[in-house]
Image: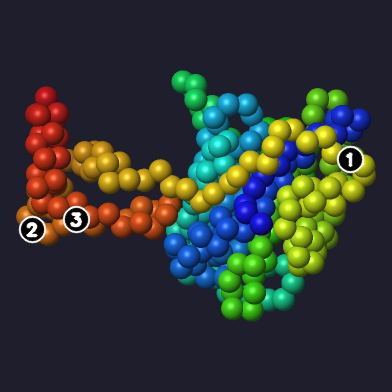
Amino acid sequence: MHDHLVRAIVRDARVRVICALSTGVVAESARRHGSSPQVTCALGRALTSGLLLATLTKGNERVTVQWAGDGPIGSITVDATADGDVRGYALHPDAGPPLQGGRCQVAETLGRHGVVNVLRDLGLKERYQGQVALTTGEVDEDVEAYLRTSEQVPSALGCEVLLDQEGRVKAAAGILVQTLPEGDPDAVREIQHALRTGRLLELLEAGERSARVLAEQIWGKGPLEWMGEERPVRFQCRCSQERIGEMLQILGTVDLDEMIAENKPAEITCNYCNTKYQVDRPALERIRAQVAPRQSN
């Protein structure tokens, strides 16, 4: 089953349900970054959380989330759009203790002390930013706490990454249930309990690979009213050779002169997708020629 996201509402309970199957997204991230099993789990939850957050408003919203903790991973940064594109990276992709059985616990990798920063870009002049302290270090639970505390919306959010014995991604998914205005917070608390006791992981272990079925099974209290069609989601970075050139224009002439003096292509690696770009000497000289007049003013 291809990666996809679905949205639904329950009019009687006044809640909305968003569910994403993100197996391919997480597997592609693990492949690109060569991440350890623990980091694959942590970053996978982060990528799926970003996809869920980016669908909460109308329009082409972009959400950037950073988890910064005191664990060996250092930090995780994820960038997601309402169109279903997501990218992300861990500062130290090879961090983490060996995996144990059952649900992958990532708090020892991320840490239990730190912050979650959420930046929402709605395409307007102003951006909206919120920050809360880490609550458990389990990534998805910390985003849930952000939604309750900073955005003051009763929410239940759970994301899971299922690995095989070799640490490869077998399945990944996430679900977000939130109250709408005048919604029933008790319904959300019931879902929160189900997620904390492993309901989503159980369904993935049983082989379920449909976001609609996952949402129906976890909600479990009657039919969901689906909003629109399934939305594909994918690991997609916005980097390019042109963007790398634009980034180098931020440097000063001294830094560019040092790169030119090495007389070999400069190699730039995108943090988000680990793609390596080379900028040859003629291109560096052209960039320097553009930068020099600005620095002389």
Give the SS element for disc 1: loop
In the picture of the structure, the residue carrying the numbered disc 3 is: 266
Instruction: Place residue 263 in its image quadrant.
Output: bottom left
Left or right: residue 146 versus residue 84 is right
Tell me which label, 3 or 1, sits earlier in the chain: 1
Q: Residue at x 67, y 52 (%)?
A: 21
Instruction: Locate residue 69, reporting x and y percent.
Output: 55, 56
Label 3's element? strand
Q: Is residue 169 left or right of residue 292?
A: right
Residue 233 in the image: x percent, y percent? Answer: 58, 46
What is the crowding at mark 1: few (fewer than 14 residues within 10 Å), some, or many (at least 20)? few
Three-letter residue code for mark 1: Pro
How much space separates mark 3 and mark 2, taking CA atoms?
9 Å
Q: Is residue 18 visible?
A: yes
Residue 158 pos. (x, y %): 73, 52
Residue at x 84% of width, y 47% of height = 216
43 left or right of 177 in image: left
Viewer-nearest of discs 1 and 2 = 1
> Is mark 1 in CB contact (under 8 Å) with mark 2?
no
Quarter of the view holding residue 147: top right
Residue shown at the point (14%, 46%) measured from the top left = 283
Give the mark nearest the N terminus, 1 or 2.
1
Residue highlighted by disc 2: 263
Question: Which amino acid lies under the numbered mark 3 shown in the image of this protein?
Answer: Ala
Q: Is residue 143 visible?
A: no
Above or below residue 165? Residue 132 is: above
Of tags 3 and 1, the one toward the viewer is 1
**Res 26 label:** none
For mark 2, give the secondary structure.
Answer: loop
Residue picked out by circle 1: 223
